[in-house]
Image (cartoon, rainbow, N blue to C red):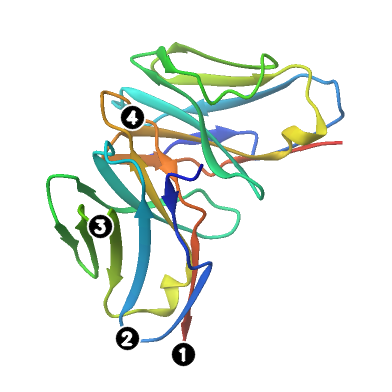
Amino acid sequence: DAGVIQSPRHEVTEMGQEVTLRCKPISGHNSLFWYRQTMMRGLELLIYFNNNVPIDDSGMPEDRFSAKMPNASFSTLKIQPSEPRDSAVYFCASGNKAKQFFGPGTRLTVL
Amino acid sequence: DQQVKQNSPSLSVQEGRISILNCDYTNSMFDYFLWYKKYPAEGPTFLISISSIKDKNEDGRFTVFLNKSAKHLSLHIVPSQPGDSAVYFCAASPGGGADGLTFGKGTHLIIQP
């Protein structure tokens, strides 16, 4: 079975550029989560969707961050404009409160 | 304010012995607790979870114990194997219909041959 798929795996961009991260959840999972991992803050929830509807976006750091889930098999996390402090590993996960499966992550570096 | 705490940044255990990883939490509304294992440059791998209405859950070499009165949980790995060397994260789900996880900072487990 295919797990959670994320692309790209690595992204290097310059400050001010738009960045789009992509995620395909496990088929049949109704909830999709975006997390970010940094040295300072560890793993933290950014936003999650249930049945394609955003439920909790309180972890989204600023208006520069936005997320969409146009259908059950695809989600995007966009940062516009990007800043060096956005450099982190971004994980997508799908599942539920008792079991969430994570993708391999996207390592973002903003120069 | 950290709601999920893993106070040991690292733990070294001899191969074949028991590894015990600890986690404390402050929010009594958490209703599920999960453990993940993470290798460098990979996503966290789900290991085992426990509902707040239970005090023990077992899956193969992994057992999780929950002590609600102490707001403490632990993950036991028996016997420890070299492939268990990784960072282990404790996570909690807030309940009340919310499913996003709150993570601890992790414990680096090193299995010595």
> Which label's residue is closer to the chain start, 4 or 3?
3
Residue A91 location, quadrant: top right
Determine the residue positioned at 31% across, 22% down.
A30
Q: Amino acid at mark 1?
A: Pro
Whether residue A1 can be seen here: no
Q: Looking at the figure, which quarter contains the N terminus of chain A?
A: top left
| Distance between the alpha carbons at the discs numbered 2 and 4 | 35 Å
- Residue at image mark 4: B99
Chain bearing tag 3 is B
Chain bearing tag 1 is B
> What is the secondary structure assignment of the residue under circle 4?
loop
Pointers 4 and 3 within a single chain: yes
- Residue at image mark 3: B70
Q: Amino acid at mark 4?
A: Asp
Q: Using the image as rendered, state which of residue A73 and residue B44 is in the foreground.
A: B44
Placement of B8 over or under B94, stated as above or below: below
Q: Amino acid at mark 3?
A: Ala
| Distance between the alpha carbons at the discs numbered 1 and 2 | 11 Å
Which circle marks residue B113 in the picture? Answer: 1
Circle 4 crowding by C-alpha within 10 Å: few under 14, some 14–19, many from 20: many
Residue A15 placement (x, y as % from top left): 86, 27
Q: Amino acid at mark 2?
A: Arg
> Which label's residue is closer to the chain start, 1 or 2?
2
Query: Does residue B113 appear left or right of residue B24 in this picture?
Result: right
Pointers 1 and 3 within a single chain: yes
Proximity of marks 1 and 2: CB atoms separated by less than 8 Å = no
Determine the residue positioned at 33% across, 73% down.
B20
Circle 1 crowding by C-alpha within 10 Å: few under 14, some 14–19, many from 20: few
